[in-house]
Amino acid sequence: MKTLFFYEWKKIVNRKIVLICMLCAVLLIIFSIGIPLVGDYVVNGERLGSNYEEFQKDITYRKALDGRAIDRTLLMEMQNAYEKVPLDKNKYSLTEEYQSYARPYSPIFNYVRQTTGLSAAGVLTLNPDVEDLQEKRLEMQESRWEEFMLSEEEKEYWRAKEEQIENPVVFRYAEGYDVLLNVAYTVGIVTVFMIAISMANVFPEEHTRRMDQQILSSKYGRKQVYWVKMCVGSVVSLGLAFVFVVTAFVSAFVLYGVEGFETAFQVLYAGSSCPMSVGQAVLIIYAIILCAGTFIGVLVMTLSENLHSSVGTLSLVIGLLVLPMVVSVSDEYRVLAQLWSYLPSEVVAVWSCFNPRMVALFGKVLQGWQVVPILYAVVGGVAAIVTKKMFVKYQVTGR
């Protein structure tokens, strides 16, 4: 059996399409992470420097704030700085006043806006007390939960989670993790698409090359061969996803630094009620990308065996992956919107992975990111079992 496993492994990994997809995905991910550092930084038509030079300035500003609690003192400093900026102007961030006074406090300004939902001008009139800021935050969260049509039990769950979040929040430099969260959607999309393309011909190739008749007379037989091929395809899918995830981590940490694992998630995503660090959030969403990549690999292989066509399979799967990008489901259709957020090309986005809708399962209440691995394992397992019967039937009667 071990010999058969390695035989099937070599057949898949040595295919040119797999190597081409892996190389393209790696380059796309590196490009997505590094592109913010490339090009010119222009204000009012005048080049002030390169994006890399400006990024270095922002690093200096953020590190100057590192370790400071977002309390009354820091909020007043931010308000005093932004009072010098003509916020009524379009693109006020391009003004000299903003660059000189407000830009060093922009992370705090953005945090307050995300936390309260206030306009730029509204931030300046906000009472800088931490208690008032927290009150406005809770008001915004309650409104958000209503939009998601949460039940009272779900709201109570999240109210309890809100009490576990540190207050006041401590700002920390976490640019590497911020970048990883921002590009998670891109990495996820690249991963599922490239794995779909790589796995589409695993089974159809046996039929087109007339290898299936040899399988019938082989030592291991069709049942064993089927499960070995599924196992190898799943391992290769997971391996490809792992390569893409590692590429993202290495690129982000080399370019932006590894500091900030323990930063509160709310510093970067103020609308979240998850009491976790940005480092934990990154690990969770990239684990979901690994799950999505493996699931797509299994799904593509099962569909290709049922359709006996790699082209037909790719058309169907790519359509399924693209659909969530062009069609959204209103939150008022609670069940459908929740299921929609679990699709492989949707759940890899931060806003879907950590949305507040819950699922009651095994006597426990689970968040979406906890449900997805279970859902993918069940659907993938059922699909593989059903397809095994089709594989055996086709081998016997397909001619």
Image: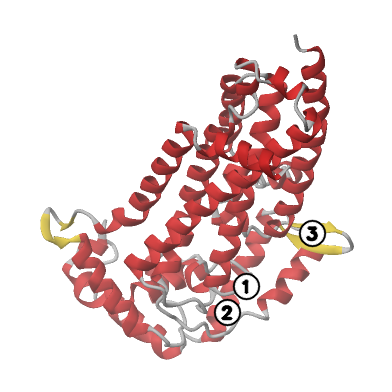
Disc 2 residue type (three-letter): Gln
Residue 370 x %, y %? 72, 59
User: In the displayed structure, does residue 190 sit left or right of residue 336?
Assistant: left
Mark 2 or 3, nearer chain start: 2
Q: In the rendered structure, are the residues bearing label 2 and label 1 in contact, judged by CB atoms less than 8 Å apart?
A: yes
Q: Secondary structure at mark 2?
A: helix
Task: Write the residue at 19% across / 53% down.
Answer: 39
Task: Write the residue at 49% across / 76% down.
Answer: 261
Disc 3 residue type (three-letter): Ser
Task: Write the residue at 23% across / 73% down.
Answer: 57
Relative height, residue 245 to residue 341 (above, below): below
Residue linked to disc 3: 151
Residue 159 x %, y %? 71, 73
Disc 3 packing (10 Å; few <14; some 14–19; many ≥20)? few
Residue in the foreground of this view, choosing between 325 and 37: 37
Q: CA distance from mark 2 to mark 3?
A: 23 Å
Disc 1 residue type (three-letter): Leu
Figure quadrant of residue 60 = bottom left
Query: In the rendered view, how is the structure colored?
Result: secondary structure
The numbered dot on residue 134 is 2
Q: CA distance from mark 2 to mark 1?
A: 6 Å
Residue linked to disc 1: 138
Q: Secondary structure at mark 1?
A: helix
Q: Number of callouts in the render?
A: 3
Q: Which quadrant: the C terminus?
A: top right
Residue 54 x %, y %? 21, 67
Relative height, residue 270 to residue 329 (above, below): below
